[in-house]
């Protein structure tokens, strides 16, 4: 049975960070790879990205059962475009807590670490986030109890965090490896032409 990743899309999500998840898991459908299904959800029937791309999630949030998924993925986004409003919503916060309670992988790119911090799951755990603007987001994450690392990508048990759009692909690759195997990851990387 295929593993399933739930990709939560908030208003103001970052398109590049989102595309890395859709592409990496999409490529698992090639040849005889270990397939991983990716399912999108959100609070709205139409979701506008930070750079004006508009998407429709596959499944309404109300129909989501965490038991049906093996991991949660969260691309970052812009607070000015509604990102924090959606991800600070108690419905999403409870979803994050449930995935963590079950020990399932949670992958957050860039400022997506902030909603994880707000949920309490990063308390006394290593994490990172957006590091520019005088470290404003890192200070915020530290105030939420995280042990902030000056690293591009941080893995603490089941949680992956990173610093910005450029790290989205490594995050998606790491999540794929956690869900399947290093061998499967290498096959996908080869097919995508990241390695020979």
Image (cartoon, helix red, strand yellow):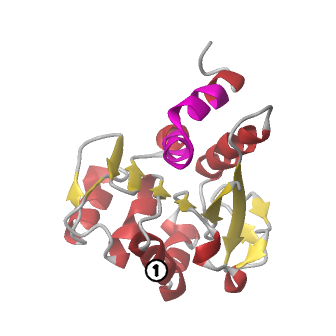
**Does the magenta portion include 195?**
no
Q: Is residue 132 visible?
A: no
Residue at image coords 58%, 33%: 185
From what the image shows, is residue 93 above or below residue 168?
below
Q: What is the number of callouts on the image?
A: 1
Question: In x, y percent, where is residue 13?
Answer: 60, 61
Quadrant location of the C terminus in the rendered image:
top right
Quadrant location of the N terminus in the rendered image:
bottom right
Question: In x, y percent, where is residue 10?
Answer: 61, 70
Which residue is situated farthest in the front direction here?
1
Secondary structure of the residue carrying numbered label 1: helix
From what the image shows, is residue 173 above or below residue 56?
above
Question: In x, y percent, where is residue 55?
Answer: 78, 63
Residue at image coords 69%, 71%: 41
Viewer-nearest residue: 5 or 86: 5
Viewer-nearest residue: 189 or 22: 189
**Does the magenta portion include 181?**
yes
Which residue carries the number 1 mark? 93
Question: In x, y percent, where is residue 151?
Answer: 29, 41
User: Image quadrant of residue 5?
Assistant: bottom right
Q: Is residue 184 visible?
A: yes
Horizontal placement of 129 versus 91: left or right?
Answer: left
Which residue is situated farthest in the top direction here?
196
User: Image quadrant of residue 31?
Assistant: top right
**Region rendered in magenta:** 171-188
């Amino acid at each position: 049975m295929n593993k399933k990743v739930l990709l939560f899309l908030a208003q103001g999500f970052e398109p590049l960070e989102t595309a890395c998840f859709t592409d990496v898991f999409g490529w698992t459908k090639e040849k005889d790879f270990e397939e991983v299904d990716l399912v999108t959800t959100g609070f709205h029937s139409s979701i506008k990205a930070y750079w004006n791309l508009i998407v429709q999630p596959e499944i309404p949030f109300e129909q989501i059962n965490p038991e049906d998924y093996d991991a949660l993925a969260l691309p970052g986004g812009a607070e000015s475009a509604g990102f924090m409003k959606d991800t600070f919503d108690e419905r999403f916060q409870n979803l994050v807590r449930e995935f963590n309670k079950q020990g399932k992988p949670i992958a957050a790119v860039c400022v997506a670490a902030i909603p994880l911090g707000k949920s309490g799951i990063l308390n006394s755990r290593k994490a990172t986030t957006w590091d520019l603007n005088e470290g404003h987001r890192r200070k915020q994450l530290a105030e939420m109890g995280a042990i902030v690392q000056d690293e591009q990508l941080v893995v603490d048990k089941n949680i992956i965090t990173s610093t910005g759009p450029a790290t989205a692909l490594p995050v998606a690759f790491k999540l794929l490896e956690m869900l399947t195997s290093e061998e499967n990851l290498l096959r996908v990387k080869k097919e995508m032409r990241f390695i020979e």
